[in-house]
Image (tube, rainbow, N blue to C red):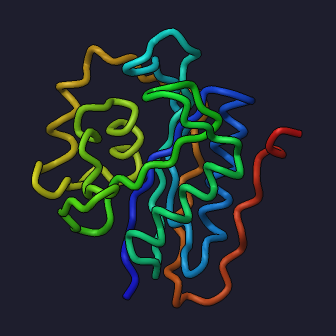
Amino acid sequence: MNVIATIGLGANLNDPAAQVEYALAELDRLPGTRLLVRSSLYASAPVGYVDQPDFINAVAQVETELAPRPLLAALLDIEHRHGRERSFRNAPRTLDLDLLLYGAAHFHEDGLTLPHPRMHERGFVLQPLLEIAPDTVIPGRGRAADWLAGCVDQSVVVVASAALRPRPPLCGGNVPPVPPAAAVNA
């Protein structure tokens, strides 16, 4: 069964925009997964630990055959390949991939909560999400658009517009890959 999953992307080290663009291309190459749509790139101030560079963020939707746990494992593998280190909470990072939504799933298990437990509090998630999917409903919370007003004190600015290209579903035949924008750590 194919499910639409929503993924948040962020980076603030080693050419963050290139890290995010390359990760978007990698999402499209996951087994049984196709990138459907991606947001523009947004700049945002760090949350939690603030003594670090600003972030570049984006949100993407994929259609996937992967269950939530294998999808999360694949996202963590992409982070690892980008040099992600988890030295402390909210530390600077080369890449952060968050599984925000998995269809209408609403559950908590050890190491995985869906929807993402803080997505409704973060302008850097809500603005790009609403750009690509303005009618999104966060299971257990309601319309994503209704939460944006609570994020007005957060600075989130578009820095690079995306060509919003709807992608055909997995059963749609040949889908050209999305080329990376730049080599990672080149």
Side of 132 where 14 appears, left or right: right
Residue 112 locus on image (x, y percent): 32, 58
Q: Quadrant of the C terminus?
A: top right
At x 46%, y 62%, the residue is 72
At x 25%, y 55%, the residue is 115
* Depth check, front residue: 46 or 62: 46
At x 41%, y 41%, the residue is 128
Against 105, residue 98 (above or below) is above
The image shows a total of numbered marks equal to 0
Side of 8 where 159 appears, left or right: right
* Depth check, front residue: 14 or 151: 14
Q: In which quarter of the image is residue 47?
A: top left
Against 160, residue 139 (above or below) is below
* Depth check, front residue: 51 or 7: 51
At x 66%, y 32%, the residue is 16
Residue 43 locus on image (x, y percent): 52, 24
Against 89, residue 100 (above or below) is below
Residue 135 locus on image (x, y percent): 24, 54
Q: Quadrant of the N terminus?
A: bottom left
Residue 42 locus on image (x, y percent): 51, 30
Which residue in the rendered view is the most extreme toward the top? 51
Q: Quadrant of residue 53?
A: top right
